[in-house]
Amino acid sequence: MATVNTTFTFSSTDISSDALSFSVSETLALTGSGGIQRANLTSATGSASAFELYNSESFGDNLESGVTSPTYLYLKNITGSGFSASAASVSTSSHIHLYVSGTVADAANNPIPKLEGTGVYPGVFPIASIRQGGFTYVPINPRLSYYVWAADATGSEGQIGGHPTETIIEFGVFN
Amino acid sequence: MGSKVNTTFTFSSTDATSDALSFSVNETLALTGSGGITRFNLRTEKYPQGARNQNGANAEQNGPDGFGTGSGYKLYHGSGSERSQAIDSRAYLYVKNITGSGFSASAAAQPTASVLHIFITSSGQINDFTGGATVESPGCYDIARIPQGSFMYLPINPRVSYVCYTPTGSECNENMNTLIEYGIFR
């Protein structure tokens, strides 16, 4: 177990019109984390269509049980210079999309539709679209699972049901 | 007028030997049309009576556990079927749950909430990815639960709306006294 300090800093070159110079921070008690990992969405284990960042039962919680532990997700789209289509045989993607889903098969207990590769995508729309070089930090809902896939900006030419494009991500889950 | 906003997110660990968590990530955003950072009490300043149907929200749209969007505060109103905006628009959401010491149940007549919930819903009908029939997003379970003192930074999907609320339980339809701080950057 370790303690992780996160600091998020805004600053602006035009403070006179936008009061955006401030900093927020928090300290997390880190348990069971695998630290920060990088993965290629094409080659990573379990990434046949989308890559699972967090499973709703990873920390023993599920839809039926109460959730008391705050859990945090850090995710960055790394793909950039040195890892482009010109350097790889498979095309790269400049966007990664984050979406949520449940893991319980019983529809009565899991009303969250999963994204499907049948030509129609009835599932939840992406909750975040992260451009190349961008990142996100989310206190996640531990009752859900979080997935990421690589696609174009709209997500409409994505890889759900197919194979992800060559895309490097960096992520960590803290509980 | 646009300006540049630099965001720096820094991790550091007191136990780097077991967890390689000392690093920093940065990005620079072109800021246009932002209202800066605003802070308010979700109940007393936005919903003094716990009113529904604020911000033009449709009470028929359901959030988590049947929670209507009319009971939440819409942080960002999505573009709906304007898929092209997903290509051209970058939008970033920062939200913090401020409620803490000095703003507790003991200091207020109404009880406070310690967790800020975020969920997404559509702003109307959205074309599905086939370009055929339109479907209305029914909302989904909380995509984020922000404990007291914590924050979220999200490059949002411009097509959907982001709503926050602070219930006492899964079936509460009124916001609790909760200070939040948020900003939208484009």
Image (cartoon, rainbow, N blue to C red):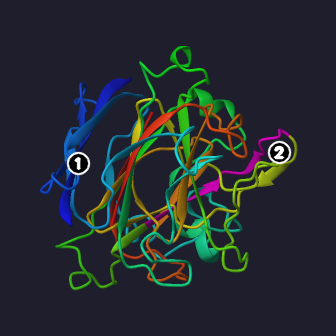
Crowding near pointer 2: few (<14 within 10 Å), some, many (20+)? few
Looking at the picture, how far across and down is residue A133, in whole percent? 41, 30
Looking at the picture, how far across and down is residue A45, in whole percent? 54, 49
Looking at the picture, how far across and down is residue B146, in whole percent? 37, 64
Quadrant containing the N terminus of chain B is: top left
Residue at 43% x, 72% y is B166
Q: Amino acid at mark 1?
A: Ala
Q: Is residue A136 left or right of residue B120?
A: left
Q: Which residues are magenta?
A: B117-131
Q: Secondary structure at mark 1?
A: loop
Report the residue that reaches farthest toward the left.
B14
Q: Marks 2 and 1: in contact by CB < 8 Å?
A: no
Write down the residue under mark 1.
B20
Residue B99 visible here: yes
Image depth: mark 1 or mark 2 in front = 1
Q: Which label number is shown at residue B133?
A: none
Quadrant containing the C terminus of chain B is: top left
Q: Which label number is shown at residue A119?
A: 2
Q: Secondary structure at mark 2?
A: loop
Chain identifier of the residue bearing label 1 in the image: B
Residue at 34% x, 83% y is B110
User: Is residue A14 highlighted in magenta?
Assistant: no
Q: Amino acid at mark 2?
A: Gly
Q: Is residue A152 left or right of residue B151?
A: right
Q: Characterize the magenta stretch by its predominant secondary structure.
A: strand
Q: Quadrant of residue A166?
A: top right
Looking at the picture, how far across and down is residue A53, in whole percent? 48, 54
